[in-house]
Amino acid sequence: MSDTSHGTGGLTFDKTKKSWPSELNVLLALIIIIVIFEFLGQVLPYMNDQSFLFDTKDRFDSIFNEARLKIIILQVAIIGIIALGVSQVIITGGIDLSSGPLVAATAMIAMSFGQTELVNGFANPKALFGPWAMDLPVVVPVVIGLSFGAFIGAINGTFVSYFKIPPFIATLGMFLICRGIALWWSSGNPISFPTAQFQAIGGGMMPVFWFLSLAVIFHIIMRYTVYGKHTYAIGSNEEAARMSGINVKRHKIMVYMIAAMLAAFAGIVLSAKASTAQAGMGEFYELFAIAMAVIGGISLSGGRGSIIGTVLGAMVLGVIRSGFTYIKLDGSYQLMAMGGIIIAAVILDQYRQRNKV
Amino acid sequence: MSEDIVLKATDLTKHYGGVHALEGANFELRKGEHVAIMGDNGAGKSTFVRQITGVEQRTRGTVVFDGTEVNFSGPIEARESGIETVFQTLALADHLDVPDNLFLGREKTKWNWLGPFRFLDYKAMRQDTLAALEKTGVKIPNIHNTIEKMSGGQRQCVAIARTASFHSKLTIMDEPTAALGVQETEQVENIIRQLKAQGEPLILVSHNMRQVFDLADRIVVFRRGRICANLDIKTGDYTGEDVVSYITGAKTGAEYEGAA
């Protein structure tokens, strides 16, 4: 047995150098954007020295403008739920474009089992099914909606892993199929007047509650469970994951199913919040969800990023949207600014990849 | 068949279309034995390894491992039955750290009733990683650095420590030091000596004559898809020049006359 204590081969890096977590970059970006809007609020002539996030009126209850904070997070909560799922798909090195239409299809399907029979004493004018489907316990539409999501996700995952179809193509096909299902389900008619229980799912700040609760749950899952570790491993080196005995195909199907179930749940919350389901709902949601993930530091090449990052990415989008309204610029400018920020986030990601920081 | 034979390949043959990459290889490995496989590029060394580890399906021949005839459908099956392989292309996940990679696919967990969402026992894996690195003499300053931040030598050491830390019935290393510097090579060789001391059998594919004479009990030489020599270097009086002449075809082992 030879002595090994002198073997110090290849120890070239400095162990004291802590890596800089990418979430901090996103947080920094978020703060900078807030400061910019705060600054614009002070200098723009038509703003009357309003503050963006702080309460400048002479009250004692809060230093923040709570109404605006609530709106910021409420605006992004439902798309944020989708982003939690698409983040996991992107971490495996895939992409899911089907989530927006899936939101609409699930909203239609779930709402049709969540309608109330009598509206102000008259028969529900938007009833899709007969009396048997009216006033069902809220668990019925929720379970049906989530099952539909799981089914769509299983198809996505099967095409990606067993038929080796690129995720972009497989979920693009599913994008069209789901939009078609949403239109076909009620022949294009809106489905409205849900039960009070169903409505309560999306009432008030409930979307924010769902978003943050699910974010905490999936943060724990991605960080501390075997599921999370294997998701990162597949995105990092699929071949190595396979050689290590991970059932890559089965795992990918599970990831696509979870992502689709989250999108389906977002559809349920959205229809409950709006008290109606329409086939055109959720337009661009898949792209905004992907944008939240990418801005939050989830690498499009897989293996890198975190749920905390995605939540911060969602906040960035929310602040930008709210900020543009605050400085009274319309939606067209918002879209252009968001597009620019997404491109900047991807450039930053590629820079990080090249420099391995 | 003798009890102490770990691996026995008979008439192992692999044709890629018309190319006879491996032809009629007969090979035996005994318990605790370290055998080196040498030969020129394209002589059939890696092809031979790929047939045994199930990466490819052989054209003809039988493989008996640990007393039973085996037909691995893939490398995972081979690994599950106890054959650990360090491939030339490293099977490591770049974005994960050392314990994650060491335990990839066989994580230590708690709360197993949670199924796929069972929790990782980070603490146990960290301790076992430190113990495994200690045992193999591999020095990694911070095991929580991700693999992408490590040098080629450190990566190789992690890959090999991974193999060595799981008690396998047979370890196969395909040119483990080909891309390494002097000190890193030394670390890898130390791990191999460790395996020898623990009585674990090894097949080492290598081009490095000095290394092979240092580490192996026996050298099997491949030439043009066939085994052309089986040299017991611990008892027989062979020099590097002898081996080179077998590799180049100047000589052929007596029992293999007419083979190549």
Image: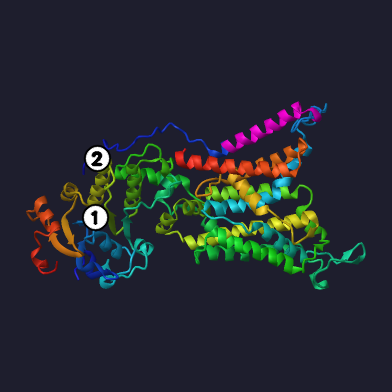
Mark count: 2
User: In the rendered image, which residue does mark 1 sit on?
Assistant: B205
In the image, is residue B259 above or below residue A349? below
Image point (58%, 50%), residue name: A87
The residue to which callout 2 is attached is B182
- Percent x, y of residue A228: 52, 52
Q: Chain of mark 2?
A: B
Residue B248 or residue A215, whichever sits in front: B248
Q: Amino acid at mark 2?
A: Val
Q: Secondary structure at mark 2?
A: helix
Is residue B203 visible in the rendered structure shown here? yes
Image quadrant in which you'd find residue B256: bottom left
Quarter holding the N terminus of chain A? top left
Image spot of residue B134 (x, y percent): 32, 42
**Most foreground residue, B33 or B77:** B77
Pointer 2 local density, CA inside 10 Å: few below 14, some 14–19, many at least 20: few
Q: Which amino acid does the dot numbered 1 rest on? A: Val
Q: Chain for mark 1? A: B
Left or right for A3, reference B80: left
Magenta segment, which residues?
A25-46
Q: Pointer 1: residues within 10 angstroms few (<14), some, or many (20+)?
A: many
The answer for how far apart the CA atoms under marks 1 and 2 are is 18 Å
Measuring from the top left, give residue A244's x and y in whole percent.
Answer: 41, 57
Q: Position of residue A4 (x, y in %)?
A: 26, 39
Which residue is located at x 32 percent, y 45 percent? B157
Q: Residue B175 lies in magenta, yes or no?
A: no
Please check the rendered image and state whether residue A33 is part of the magenta-colored stretch, yes or no: yes
**Is residue B251 found left or right of B34 in the rendered image?**
left
